[in-house]
Image: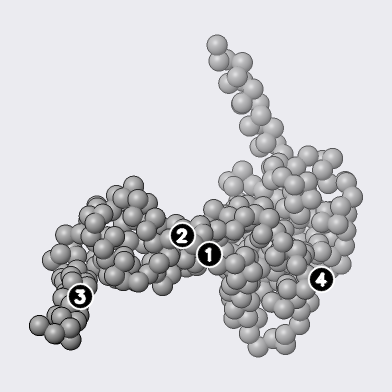
Amino acid sequence: MNSFVLQLIFFFASFLLVFTPRNYLLNSDSFIEESLSTEDDISLYIERSQPMDSIFSTLSKKGLTIDPEVFDWARRLSGWRSVPRGHYRINNNGSLDKLLEKLGRGLQDPITLTVLPGQNIQSIVQQFEKQSIYQQDDFFEALNDSTWLATVNSDTDRVVGQLYPETYLVYWTDQPKTIIGRLIKENTKKLSTLIEGEPFTSTRWEEVIIMASIIEWEYKFEEEKKRIGGLYWNRLNSNMRLQADPTVNFALGERRRLLYRDYSFEHPYNTYRINGLPPGPITNPSYTSLEAAARPERHGYLYMVASPEGTHTFTTSYEDHQKASKIWRDWIQEQYRIKKQREQSTP
C-alpha cells in the first residue's frame, strides 16, 4: 500500500472522528435534550468575560444538569472560547449547541427595571444599581454631567423629574447614560402628548414637570390631582406664594408632618419663603401627575387643607380656609387626646 493511499485513509478516519461525533452531538435532539435539564429557568450573570470552559461549574451549581464530558466535547467542537459579560436566561427549551452559541456570541436576555413614582434621586439610583452591573457612583456621575444632560434636553436641577416611572426592559450591562437617557426620552414622549399643539418652550415644559412633582407628593386620592393642579396655578397666577408643604419636606430632606417652625427657614425650595415655583422638581412624577399639571381642573380655589376624611377641603376665600383649618386642627387634637387616653389606660 503506497503512502498516498495511507494518507487518504488517515484523512477519512480523522474526518469521521471529528465531524461525525460533532454532527451527532450538536444535531441529535434526543441526545441534546438528555444533556440539558433544569427544573427552573436559570439566570446567569457574568460580571466580566470569562473562558467558556469555566462556565460548566457555574451552570451546575445553578441546577443545570449537563454531562461534563459532553459539555466539554461540545464546547471544544463549537469553537466558542469565552463568554462576554452579561445576563443570560437558560431553560429546557434550548439545545446544547444553541446554548453554546448564545453564550459565545453574548446574546443577552433583558431584565425588568421598575422605576416607581414619587421617589427621590437617591432611591432611584439605588434601584438602578440593583438592576445593573454599574455602581451608584457611575449613575451619579452621569446625573451630574451637565454637558451630556444638555444633549438629552435636561439639566442637573430638572433631571429627577424626568426619570419617568415605568417598567422597562433593559440589559444588565447597559451603561448609566443609556438607562437614564431612555427614562428622560420616555418622559419627553409622555409630556409632548399632554401639551401637544402648544408652542415648545423649555420654560413651559420645566414648569409642568416641577408642578407635577409637587402634585405627586401632595395628593392623597387620584381624583384630587387635577383640582390640586388648578389650585396651585391659580395661586401663581394671582401673584400668591405657592405655599406647598411638599416643597418644605424636600428642603428638609424628609417626608413627615410639618411643624410651624419648619415653614420659616430660608431655602430655595421653601415655597412659603420664595415667590413662584422652586428651582427644580422635587421628585419623579407619574403620568397622571404630569396630566394634572399640564391640564388642570379649572376652578376658583386658592386654598386647601387636609380633612378628617383623608381628602382635602378646597376653598376660594381665606375666611373659609380658616374655618376648614380649624376643623382639621380640632380633629388632630382629638386624635392626640384619644391616643393619650388609650396609653394611660394600658397597663
What is the CA distance from the residue labelled 1 to the residue labelled 3? Answer: 42 Å
- Which residue appears at 35% of the width and 50% of the height? 57
Of the numbered discs 4 and 3, the one sitting upstream in the chain is 3
What is the CA distance from the residue labelled 2 to the residue labelled 4? Answer: 62 Å
Amino acid residing under circle 3: Ser
Where in the figure is residue 101, as x and y percent of width and height?
A: 34, 71
- Which residue appears at 40% of the width and 67% of the height? 81
Where in the figure is residue 115, as x and y percent of width and height?
A: 55, 60
Q: Contact, CB < 8 Å: mark 4 with mark 3?
A: no
Coloration mode:
one colour
Mark 2: secondary structure: strand
Which of the image's four quarters has the N terminus? bottom left
Mark 1: secondary structure: loop
Q: Nearer the viewer, residue 341 or 198?
A: 198
Q: Is residue 297 visible?
A: no
Mark 4: secondary structure: helix
- Which residue appears at 37% of the width and 51% of the height? 58
Amino acid residing under circle 1: Thr
Q: Which residue is mark 4?
A: 237
Of the numbered discs 2 and 4, the one sitting upstream in the chain is 2
Where in the figure is residue 192, as x and y percent of width and height?
A: 63, 81
Q: Contact, CB < 8 Å: mark 1 with mark 3?
A: no
Q: Which residue is mark 2?
A: 50
What is the CA distance from the residue labelled 4 to the residue labelled 1? Answer: 47 Å
Of the numbered discs 4 and 1, the one sitting upstream in the chain is 1
Q: Which residue is mark 3?
A: 14
- Which residue appears at 35% of the width and 71% of the height? 79
